[in-house]
Image (cartoon, helix red, strand yellow):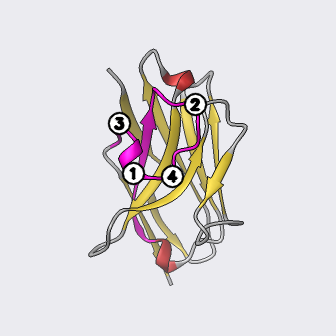
């Protein structure tokens, strides 16, 4: 059984920063590809960032490249999303996802088997 629990969301002014955390439980964490997605009201869930099992490879959506950083601490079984220079258009519910069977970068939501409950990020102008 794999469980994901996000934390770190909140309300921040434009230009500010937040760090999201995703604690992943389960024996297969170290071999899990992981990613972050977001969903704004009235919009479809969209890809934000992905990281492979070792943390050696990352990939970002163009909309967040240069502002967001995904990382992982396998000893703590946690994946992070550092968000800097936040914009009002970053407002959304952010979800972390994991696929224990993959060592690769996964960019599509359909490639992930497990999801967290989501954490709200609101950026005021």
Kindly indicate whether the residue at mark 2 contacts the one at mark 4 (C-beta within 8 angstroms): no
Asked where in the image residue 111 lies, by quadrant, the reply is: top left
| Few, some or many residues within 10 Å of mark 2 (<14, 14–19, 20+) | some
Where's residue 38, x and y in %?
41, 61
Q: Quadrant of the N terminus?
A: top left
Q: Is residue 24 left or right of residue 71?
A: left
Q: Could you tell me which secondary element the residue under label 1 belongs to?
A: helix
Q: Could you tell me which secondary element the residue under label 2 belongs to?
A: loop
Query: Which residue in the protein does label 1 denote?
Result: 109
Where's residue 86, x and y in %?
58, 71
Comparing marks 3 and 4, which lies closer to the viewer?
4
Give the residue displayed 41% in from the left and 19% down from the top: 26
Kindly indicate whether the residue at mark 3 contacts the one at mark 1 (C-beta within 8 angstroms): no
Q: Which disc, if any, is residue 103? A: 2
Mark 2 and mark 3 lie on one chain; the one further toward the N terminus is: 2
Residue span colored magenta: 91-116
Q: Nearer the viewer, residue 124 or 82?
A: 82
Q: Which disc, if any, is residue 114? A: 3
Query: Which residue in the protein does label 4 denote?
Result: 107
Comparing marks 1 and 3, which lies closer to the viewer?
1
Kindly indicate whether the residue at mark 1 contacts the one at mark 4 (C-beta within 8 angstroms): no
Q: Nearer the viewer, residue 91 or 62?
A: 62
Asked where in the image residue 83 lies, by quadrant, the reply is: bottom right
Where's residue 9, x and y in %?
45, 55
């Amino acid at each position: 059984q794999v469980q994901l629990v996000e934390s770190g969301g909140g309300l921040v002014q434009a230009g500010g920063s937040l760090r999201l955390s995703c604690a992943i439980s389960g024996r297969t964490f170290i071999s899990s590809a992981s990613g972050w997605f977001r969903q704004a009201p009235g919009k479809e869930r969209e890809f934000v960032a992905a990281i492979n099992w070792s943390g050696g490879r990352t990939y970002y959506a163009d909309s967040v490249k240069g502002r967001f950083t995904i990382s992982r601490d396998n000893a703590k079984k946690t994946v992070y999303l550092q968000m800097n220079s936040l914009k009002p258009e970053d407002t959304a519910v952010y979800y972390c996802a994991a696929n224990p069977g993959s060592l690769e970068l996964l960019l599509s939501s359909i490639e992930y088997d497990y999801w967290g409950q989501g954490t709200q990020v609101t950026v005021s102008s």
